[in-house]
Amino acid sequence: MLQVILDELKLSGTKLVAVSKTKPAEQIMEVYKQGQRIFGENRVQEMAGKYEELPKDIQWHMIGHLQSNKVKYMAHFVSMIHSVDNFKLLKEINKQAQKHNRIINCLLQFKIAREETKTGFDIPVARQMLEDEAFSNLRNIKICGVMGMATFTDDLLQVRSEFQKLKSIFDQLRQDYFFEQPAFKEISMGMSGDYRVAIEEGSTIVRIGSLIFGKRI
């Protein structure tokens, strides 16, 4: 199934994050041996343990809700953080990255779903942050784009409209704040059940777990 997905994504130029949360190192290695190098986790401690155990050319992406006090455990190796949903967290990422003389790639997470459990910026709060002088002083983070999670529903029309909303947010931010910054190019949206819709609506990164690793037990 992995090769089928990779062939699909190759046509669109979309990157794959293989969501390996809860999966053992042995199973991750099976996917690694097929050529996959980007893996996504939603718990910092689990990702840190896998980083120590698995090959060092793996790019680890943090895709789950992130607490500020956990950043220090992954700042020395994480490749990208998808789930930056507040200014306090971004400042902590910058602080910890500075300690390791790194620049950490980040995505701003926006709330596009109707579900109350989903977190993320809204446009006014994001604009306030981006226009804050304190933001311009963050030298050890790089904002590479946006991330969003659609409502968990079988209604693909609703999912499509939410993906369209995220694409619109991306376009607004690029035009107003990142127009001359080529690194701002990523739209992380789409999972196992809706990644094809996400690609049609402009996703550059999809996060797929169950189609690759099987259903979580």
Image (tube, grey):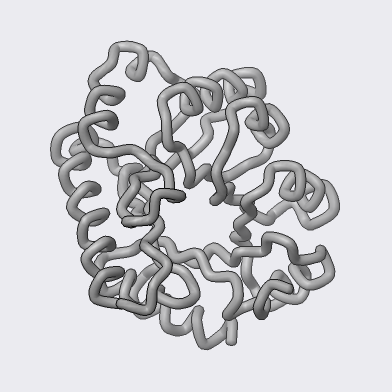
How far from the left and from the top, in percent, is residue 145? 34, 45
Q: Quadrant of residue 209?
A: bottom right
Q: Is residue 149 above or below residue 2?
A: above
Q: Is residue 212 above or below residue 65?
A: below
Residue at screen point 52% across, 43% down: 81
Residue at screen point 78% across, 52% down: 50
How far from the left and from the top, in percent, is residue 109? 39, 44
In the rendered picture of this protein, how many numbered marks are placed on residues? 0
Residue at screen point 40% across, 73% down: 195
Which quarter of the rendered picture does the C terminus lie within? bottom right
Q: Quadrant of residue 79?
A: top right
How far from the left and from the top, in percent, is residue 69? 65, 26
Whether residue 96 sits left or right of residue 132 in the image: it is: right
Which quarter of the rendered picture does the N terminus lie within? bottom right
Whether residue 90 sits left or right of residue 54 in the image: it is: left
Residue at screen point 38% across, 36% down: 143
141 vs 111, nearest the viewer = 111
206 vs 148, nearest the viewer = 148
- In the picture as drawn, the residue positioned furthest to the front comes out as 116
Q: Is residue 102 above or below residue 204?
A: above
How far from the left and from the top, in percent, is residue 208? 53, 70
